[in-house]
Each structure stands twice: as C-alpha cells, then as structure tokens.
Amino acid sequence: MSGKKTLDFPVAKRLWQYLLPYWRLELITFLVMAMLAMLSLTLPIAIQIMIDDLIPWLMKSGDRGAKLGRVILFGGALIGIYLANILLSWWRDYLAGKIGANIIADIRSQFFGHLERVSLRFYQTHQVGEIMSRLMSDVARIQDLLTATLLSFLANILLLVAIFIYLLNVNWLLTLVALIPVPLTIWLSNLFGKKLHMISDRLQSTIASLSAKLQEAFLSTRIIRAFGQEDTERKKVDSILRTLANCYIRNSVVTSLGSNTVHFVNMIGPIVILSWGTYLVAGGSIKLGALMAFYVLLSYLYSPVRDLASTNIEVHSAMASVNRIFEYLDLPPAITQDPEPVELTNPRGAIALKNVSFGYEENGFRIDNLSLEIKPREKIAIVGPSGAGKTTVINLIMRFFDPDEGAITIDGVDVRRVSIQSLRSCFGLVDQDPLLFKTTLFNNIAYADPKAAMEEVVAAARIANIHDFISGLKDGYDNEVGERGVTLSGGEKQRVCLARAILKNPPILILDEATSSLDSNSEELIQEALNRVLADKTAIIIAHRLSTVQHSDRIIAMHNGRIVAEGTHEELLERSPLYRELASKQLLI
C-alpha cells in the first residue's frame, strides 16, 4: 500500500518541485528566520549582562543620572529587539502564507488536470466523494507540510545551531552534558511518528469514505425517502462517524503521549544543569548571570529539539496524505498525444475501424477484430442487447480509450496521430444521461462555444425545439438550472443538450440512447429536431428503441462485442435473428 511509504529521497524530490517556482520567496523567508533565530539569543544574553555587569555597575556608581540613562538605554534596547521580532515574525508569516496559498493552488490544479486525462474506468470504480476528499483534505495537509512544517524545521535548525554555539562558548562541558537526552528524543520521535503515520493513513481514508457516503446520500435523497430508508442511511453514516471518532481519539492520544514523553526526557538536561550549575556558582567556577543565561538558553535549546521531534511526527503523519495524492498522480493517462500531432482541417466525417480489438480488465468484456466503415454524412444506427459493446465502440471512436490492436481513422488519418483538441472538435455528443451544469441555460448551451453570441444560441435552441420553452421562463436564457439540471424534465434537459451539440456544429454527431427515457411527446420533438440537424452530418445513433432508428441509412446489430449483422431495417428483419428478436419484443413485427 502507498500509505506505508515514508519520506524517502524520490518523494522529497517530487515535493521539492512544488517549492522550486517560489525559491526566491523561500530564500527571503529563510533569511528572515535566520534573523529571528539571532534575535532569540538576545534575552538570555541580556539577562547575563544585567546580572553580571549592569547590576554590579549600578551598585558601584554614584551618579544617579548615569544610572537612569544606563537603565533607560538597556530597556530601550530590549523594546527595540522585541519590536524587530514582531515585525520579522509578521513578515515570515506573510511570506509563508503566500507560498502556501500558491503551492496548494498548484497541486490542486495539477491534480485536477491529471484526473481529467485518466481513463473513464477510473470514475466508474472510484467514488466522487473519495476523489474530492483527496483533492481538498489531503492537499491541504501537503500545504502544511511544505510551509508550516518545513519552515518550523528550518527555524529550529537555525535556532539550534545558534544556541549550541553560544552554549559551547559559555561552558563546553555543561553543553555536552545537556545533549545527553537528545539521542533518546530522536528515537522516541521516530517511534511515535511511525505509529501516527499508520493512524493518519486510516484517518484520511475514513474521511474519504465519509465524503463519498455523504455525496451518495445527498444525490440519492429522493430514492432514500421513497423507500423509507432514512434510518438505514443514517446508521451507515453513524458507523463511519464512529470509526472516524476512534481515529481522531487515537491520533490525539498518540500525539499527546509522544509530545509529553519527549518533553519529559528533555527536562532531564535542565534539571541536571541547574543542580550542577548551582554547585559551580558556589565554587566560583561560573558567574550567576552566566548560569542563568545558560539555563534560559538551555530551555531554548530543548524547545527546538522538542519541536524538531514534533516535526518528525508531523512529517510521518502528513506522508499518508502525500502518498494518497501521488497514488492518483501516478495513474497513467488514458491516452497520450502524438509528439507531432496532425490537425484535421475541414473534416468530412468518414470513419473507419480496422480490425479493432479492445477489452476491459475489470469484467473480461472484449471486442475482437471488429471492422466498420462509415461514409461521410451517412446515418448509421448501432443496436443490440445491453452489454453488446455499442457504447464501447463510441468511446473508441472518440478516443476515450485506445484499442489494444487495430486502428481507427477519421478521413483516413489514424486518430492516435490527430491532436486531441482537433479530434474532439469533430464530434458532438448527446448522451443518454443529459448533463447540465449549475449555471444559466445560455451558458449550458454555449458550453460548446463560449464565444457564441446570443443569436447563435437562440438559433441552436430553435432547431432543438427548446426555444419556446426557454422563452416562457421568467428569466429566459438567464434562468439558472439546478445541479445536473434537476429543475428541468428529462425531455427538456435532452433538448438543451441537443442545442449544445447543434451550436458546436460538428461534422459527426453521436446520439447515445438520446431518447431512451423520454415520453412520446418529448421523443417526437427530439426526432423533429434531429431530422433537421442530421441532414449534412455523419451520425452514429445508439438505441434500444428500434422505432427511432429504422429509417437510418444502415443499422449495425451487435452482440458480445461482435457485429453480427448490418443492413436496412427491412433487410435485418429478413436475415438477422437477433434483430428480428429485438423487433418482436418491441412489437415492430
């Protein structure tokens, strides 16, 4: 499983690619943090100066004005240092926020762009809610890793080096004694980090499952209520929530136990140093101010050590999200574009499948050695029982998949040599599940051509027999449809989708069960529109309802991934048992 991987060099190198575009900002942030690390040394140094130098001088001096001036100067210097610390901290946080916001946008853009190119089978085997969880939740954790966690790591390293050098200068022996707990701290952080990594992997997976289940329930609310299954669905969600709660509890317990154990180990050093230092002060080996400064700096020393241990734990925890994102980014695209693609100019719409073979690994379905030629402006229909391979043929022609063997050509050019944009511009698709976006009717139709003028959109709507309906709405073409077009009937959605395809005006129009779920009146309106639209286009019509395709130029009958017969409606009734059976069931004979 990907969730078991850790931050090895290849993973770190991939993460670095997201930081690289912002290296200048990263460098400035690093310099700001270096200055903050230097400023952190000023308080213990000031304490040492106050105890060992300022107070003895004030006790000896008899000039009250000089005393007051020295105290004001000392206090003013500290105020200036604190103000500088505030300003630099603000600058650091601003830079970190800017870098983080850009990184998270870059990762999500790459993630979305990549998932646009993966196989359609991916979306048939993965829930949208789970994908959304990775895009939102897991990417946000990567942002924390590359900004807050990384900056904390760098700041603590700088602070650690600065403090260590100063402590060595004060008393090298005490410094070495103080470092004794550090190896144990590192070991403990790794131990708890590995445990948190496993818990975090389970946690993110459960969040994804919850997201997927909620989306499914919200989209299916009408069916859930119709069958009275509200309590059943509630129990399913509650079960996932209980699992999620247990994950959060385990995560909190292990995090707290790890942090407090490391904190306890780190306290051993200061206790030993304070005890031994008291003895050294009494013996005159070290001044009281130097001991106090040493003790304060020692607490500063263990603070970055403790924070570095926490950083290690956080990295292990975040790696679950990193691996979940890279798991999807490593999915191969369904197709790749030729390095020197061909652009189709004025395509005529001639299509040829030559000895094409293709199969789905998931269910074992295959198309073997299929050949088919479609002439420009020819209207063909593909019929057959469910699972015959009709939609698979369409998917291959539109190059949603590449065949395992054989070739598919448009106007004699292999589709694998044609640029993807040029190829897709040849097709207009009206699917059996008419999909509309949550926007205005104008934008839904103009989706085929975002630059289209109102007159062009209206013309397409007229041809699709939907203009009168739209004009009767309160806001007309500015009327906004609900998600997936839920505010419209099936026939209305289908005609809007047909208008969208008409506006595109492609040389090839594909109708995949476009009238299968419509009432007779809606189907009649669609058929009237199609008769006008298909006059000068190549058309491929997939249909179960034979009455909608019996006037096609040619009908292709398919069964189990093979073409078993082809001809006109009358010819197939005579010589194709499969077609005759389909027609008989639909009372066409």
Image: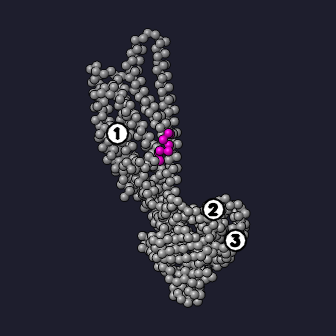
Q: Is residue 69 above or below residue 131?
A: above
Q: How is the image coloured?
A: one colour
Image point (56%, 73%), residue name = 351
Magenta stretch contains residue 365? no
User: Which element is circle 1 on?
Assistant: helix
Amino acid carrying mark 2 in the image: Tyr
Badge count = 3
The picture places residue 141, in percent across and down from the top left corner, at: 45, 49
User: Which element is circle 3 on?
Assistant: helix
Image point (52%, 74%), residue name = 353
Residue that numbered label 3 is attached to: 463
Residue 525 visible in image: no
The picture places residue 408, in percent across and down from the top left corner, at: 52, 71
Tell me where the magenta segment starts and ends, as one range: 18-25
Q: Is residue 183 above or below residue 457?
A: above
Decide if residue 318 is on the left or right side of residue 24.
Answer: left
Which quadrant holds the C terminus? bottom right
Residue that numbered label 1 is attached to: 263
- Mark in front: 1 vs 2: 2
Amino acid carrying mark 3 in the image: Ile
Image point (48%, 41%), residue name = 23
For marks 1 and 3, the one nearer the N-term is 1
| Viewer-closest of 543 and 483 | 543
Amino acid carrying mark 1 in the image: His
Q: How many C-alpha atoms fall within 10 Å of the one at disc 1: few (<14), some, or many (≥20)?
A: some
The picture places residue 492, in percent across and down from the top left corner, at: 65, 70
Q: CA distance from mark 1 to mark 3?
A: 75 Å
Residue that numbered label 2 is attached to: 447
Which mark, residue 36?
none
User: Which element is circle 2 on?
Assistant: helix
